[in-house]
Amino acid sequence: MLNVKSNMDFENSNTTDADEIPKLNDLTTSSSTEPVAKNTAFFHEKNNYPDHIFLNAAQIFQNIRVEKPPDKVVVKYGNRSGSGLTLPNFKDEKCQRWSYELAFSALKYQDLLENILLDSGLYPCPSIADDRTSLMIVILYDYQDRKFQPRILSNKEELIPEVQEIEHYLFRYKNKLAASLARCRIKYDALTIDHILPENVRKQEQRAFTLPLYAWINTVKTSFEDICGALKKEGYSKVNAAPELEGYAFCVDEHCPDVLVFPPHLREELNNLQLFTEHKLLLQDKYHSLAVHSVKALLNMDDDILVTNGCTGLTLAHMSMLTNQFTCNIFVCGIKSETKESELQELFARIECKNIKFLRENFMDIDPVDHRLQKAKIILLLPLCSGSGVSDPVQFILNEHRDAGLLQDFSQGSVAEDKLHVLARQQSLELTHATKFHKVQAIVYCTCSVYAQENENVVTKALEISIEGNKAQPYRLSPPVLPLCHPSEIMLASGKFFKMEPSELTNGCFLAVLSRERDPSETVSVKDVLARAAAKGLLEGVEMAKPPKREEKKKKSKTSLQKNVSSASVSQAKIAEFLNRESSNSNTKIPLSKPPSTLLQKNMGQINSNIQNKRVLKQITSTVVLGTAKNTNSLSSMSKVFDKQTNMKPKSEDKMIALKPVEIVLPPVLLPFYNSTGSKARNPSNSYPGLYRLNGVKNSLQNSLAPSLTILNKQKETLPFVVRHPRPWL
């Protein structure tokens, strides 16, 4: 068993010149003291890796290492398909992350570690086979990262013979290894080994140390207020913004109101917090939340969502949480294996997601007119991308379930042109295929890449293709549907793209919203929108504005329409009967000008198109005539005015206005009547002066009606009763 005491024995037996050992303070692997200070406890725990972590890391490194040309191969690693090491299953997520971190660190310094082994004379070693060279490289990196200090292991840790053998071998020659490391630093003129890396890789490492943790709230199980209260009980304090995060603190994200932000050094503690173990808070990178919130902003109540391949289970769960009050389904493409489906079902059961449905086909194999997707109105496209905007590659690989081979690109700080071309071509094909779904009204395209080849170029090309070949309404770029919090975001969104550059607070992100142009024939009025909202129950508790008085008058006029029509028809029938009787007695026809009858006929036709009323009006027109040409001329002038008014073309906004019925009062064809005492009553013309408001008509009408009045007076004297109604023609 290799412990601290045995390591000291090996150190005393070392005969290497001590003067070649550089100062331990110069062997730090960080170029910035601030990130290290914030994460001291975190790295102290990692520096005591158990043996099985080295085995896992060696297996990962064997598959992702940089393979040099045959003429330059000095250090041999054996076959890439297998290293001859037994790879146990990861015990938990923590062990998995540590294994990938150790393998990625060894990959970044692969050239340096090989030079140290060659310069110190430790390679080749006859007792160590080529298929275990990967294990030696991984252990050597961890050894120099601990400044060549021995590991302190607990008695509970299981020791693995292969790991113990290589560690003993390296520890025996630690002075030679330290001296070789110092010479390499001098050769590269590097203050620390970090300076041997490309500049963009070093900046990426620094951002990874300071990148906050983002967690969205599971609103099905809890609420925002309950989460804040529970965190405060655990000793966390709420601050205003992410730059203020220190110690045990959290804040609300400025773009997504259901996302909380935590300091990076609290990862392990948060994973053990009850809120996270009960899936009330879930850690996930922010750019996924940005994509999900963009979809929700475009979603109607009954719309379905189609999610393409490559979407993680947590992203689907977050989408389900945001749409749990909608009557929509989330269709996920590319779930082929039953194992993957069962894993997702188990995750969704723990989080309590219910509206997610799986599709076996890949997105590119789905027919745009598939009957299952007739209600799908939004497509969320999260294509495979280079991830060049990510600051923590290991976390990106694990969260996205991506191929560990991407770590090669991260270790070099750039993506090979041929690989970038392949990614961009696949992204373009997927986005173009998404535009062929005629029922879909919007597409949300999101990557975590900083390359224009994967972002703006892909979107622009897809828009051009959709305009040329699609018979449906074409797509156009829509402004970002997320709040722009800083002037830099406003500048980046000037091209209708939402972009965030990699920083100490966020990973890089690109987001574009493509919305289909509305068909001009499918105009929707405000009344229709309010009716839909009321049908969906969205206007509960909201008082609708009272209609204007003009609208109320219109409604009242419509409700009293039938009453006015019926009363008008009865009145006109009485008038016609009376005039017919009088004309038959006196053999005199009294012509009436055409305008009143014409106006009345038009009004009555607009109100109710009643055939009986039309017959009455025709009868009145045929029986009533005027006696003199003067009267005819005066009333015919009025007829022109009425005709002009009635023949005017109504405006579009006045077509639906119901006209108020007009009551036509005929000239005073009145009978004198007697009161109860037998005396003659006063002249009705004096009682009703409003009947003679037409100037120039009063006298002529009286003269023309004189014979009729004389005959009527004679008949009245012989009547056995007295007519008391002030308007007998009614």
Image (tube, rainbow, N blue to C red):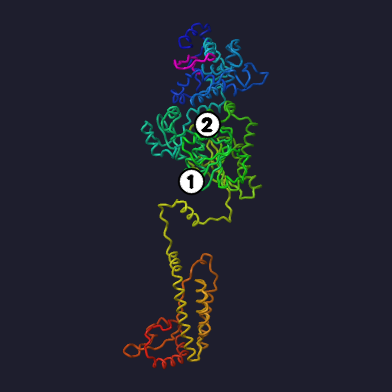
Q: Nearer the viewer, residue 477 or 580?
A: 580
Q: Nearer the viewer, residue 510 or 151?
A: 151
Residue 371 highlighted magenta (yes or no) = no
Q: Main secondary structure of the magenta part?
A: loop
**Do labels 1 and 2 touch, CB within 8 Å?**
no
| Residues packed near mark 2 inside 10 Å, few (<14), some (14 to 19) or many (20 plus) | some
The location of residue 260, given as percent across then percent down, is: 44, 36
- In the displayed structure, 449 sits above or below 627; it is above
**Residue 83 placement, left or right of 28:** right
- The residue furthest left is 677
The location of residue 700, given as percent across then percent down, is: 47, 88
From the image, which quarter does the C terminus lie in? bottom left
Q: Which residue is tagged 1?
A: 326
Q: Is residue 447 visible?
A: yes
The location of residue 404, given as percent across then percent down, is: 57, 27
Mark 1 vs mark 2: which is more N-terminal?
A: 1
Residue 155 highlighted magenta (yes or no) = yes
- In the displayed structure, 439 sits above or below 427; it is below
| Residues packed near mark 1 inside 10 Å, few (<14), some (14 to 19) or many (20 plus) | some
Question: Label 2 sits on what residue type?
Answer: Asn
Residue 410: numbered disc: none
The location of residue 156, given as percent across then percent down, is: 45, 17
- Label 1 residue SS: loop
- Label 2 residue SS: helix
Residue at the location (44% across, 76% down)? 567
- In the displayed structure, 692 sits above or below 75; it is below
Q: Is residue 696 visible?
A: no
Residue 399: numbered disc: 2
The span picked out in magenta is: 145-163
